[in-house]
């Protein structure tokens, strides 16, 4: 049975699962679908088009599936999909999609800290930690297990690789490849995310291979030459192939 405060508003057309807690002054719009075992603390807004999974905790002032801040948006019916077991802290805003992709997506088991903004058509992976007041412009992609510190500004269409650590206060308009630390001003490669990789169970041989891959990649003036060197000198494994695919598919170029 759901526990809905008498001071909350739930639209009659909203679809709720079971065992949700909806605190006072929450607002749940029509065309919303909510799973089971979610906790919406006071003052949470769930807007038109939200699709929320199970076991999420959403804190006061958060607004999910907000109207996109995009002048090209003409009121088309789009969605914002949130997975399971996320902690969405105070005043987080997540816009729904536009005609470009139709959906903004947030995975599962993420910690999204206070004041974060995720714009239209972004794709956020799972097991990410994203710090206070960080802002994503439209159509940003963040792969699984990325750690992004506070007050980071991310240009539209950027791609952030998995297992990265991005230092607080960074701003960038190019892609951040996987497994690295990015920081300083302007934002650049600061080595591999050694502590993060060890915490995730990467063994020393694999860490050394990742480090060598970036040494080869950044030692060449032309990235294609670096990729060719990686293919010639390092073992064929998923982690090395992920780096190669990421760089080859980068549309904005990677930080150097």
Image: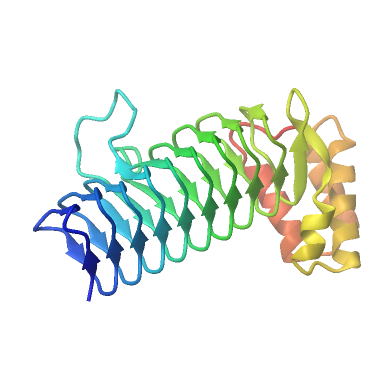
Outermost residue to the left:
12
Q: Position of residue 64 (x, y in %)?
A: 33, 46
Question: 7 or 125, which is in the foreground?
Answer: 7
Horizontal arrangement in the rendering, residue 40 relative to residue 221 (left or right): left
Instruction: Examine the image and state in which quarter residue 93 appears.
Output: top left
Task: Give the quarter of the figure containing the N terminus.
Answer: bottom left
Labels in figure, total: 0
Vertical side of 47 occupied by 115: above or below: above
Q: Position of residue 31 (x, y in %)?
A: 17, 53
The colour style of the image is rainbow
Q: Residue at x 66, y 49 (%)?
A: 147
Task: Give the quarter of the figure containing the C terminus.
Answer: top right
Q: Residue at x 24, y 48 (%)?
A: 25
Vertical side of 224 occupied by 22: above or below: below
Vertical side of 152 occupied by 237: above or below: below
Question: 156 or 23, which is in the foreground?
Answer: 23
């Amino acid at each position: 049975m759901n526990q809905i405060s008498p001071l909350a508003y739930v639209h009659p057309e909203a679809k709720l699962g079971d065992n949700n807690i909806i605190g006072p002054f929450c607002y749940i719009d029509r065309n919303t679908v909510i799973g089971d075992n979610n906790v919406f603390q006071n003052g949470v807004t769930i807007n038109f088009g939200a699709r929320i999974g199970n076991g999420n905790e959403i804190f006061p002032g958060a607004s999910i599936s907000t109207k996109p801040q995009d002048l090209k948006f003409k009121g088309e019916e789009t969605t914002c999909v949130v997975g399971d077991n996320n902690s969405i802290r105070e005043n987080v805003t997540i816009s729904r999609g536009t005609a470009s992709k139709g959906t903004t997506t947030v995975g599962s088991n993420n910690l999204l800290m206070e004041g974060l903004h995720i714009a239209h058509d972004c794709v956020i992976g799972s097991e990410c930690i994203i710090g206070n007041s960080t802002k994503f412009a439209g159509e940003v992609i963040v792969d699984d297990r990325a750690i992004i510190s506070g007050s980071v500004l991310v240009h539209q269409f950027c791609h952030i690789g998995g297992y990265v650590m991005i230092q607080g206060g960074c701003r960038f308009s190019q892609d951040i490849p996987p497994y690295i630390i990015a920081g300083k001003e302007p934002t650049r490669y600061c080595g591999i995310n050694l502590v993060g990789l060890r915490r995730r169970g990467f063994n020393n041989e694999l860490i050394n291979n990742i480090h060598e891959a970036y040494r080869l990649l950044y030692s060449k003036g032309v990235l294609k030459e670096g990729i060719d060197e990686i293919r010639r000198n390092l073992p064929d494994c998923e982690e090395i192939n992920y780096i190669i695919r990421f760089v080859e598919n980068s549309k904005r170029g990677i930080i150097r």
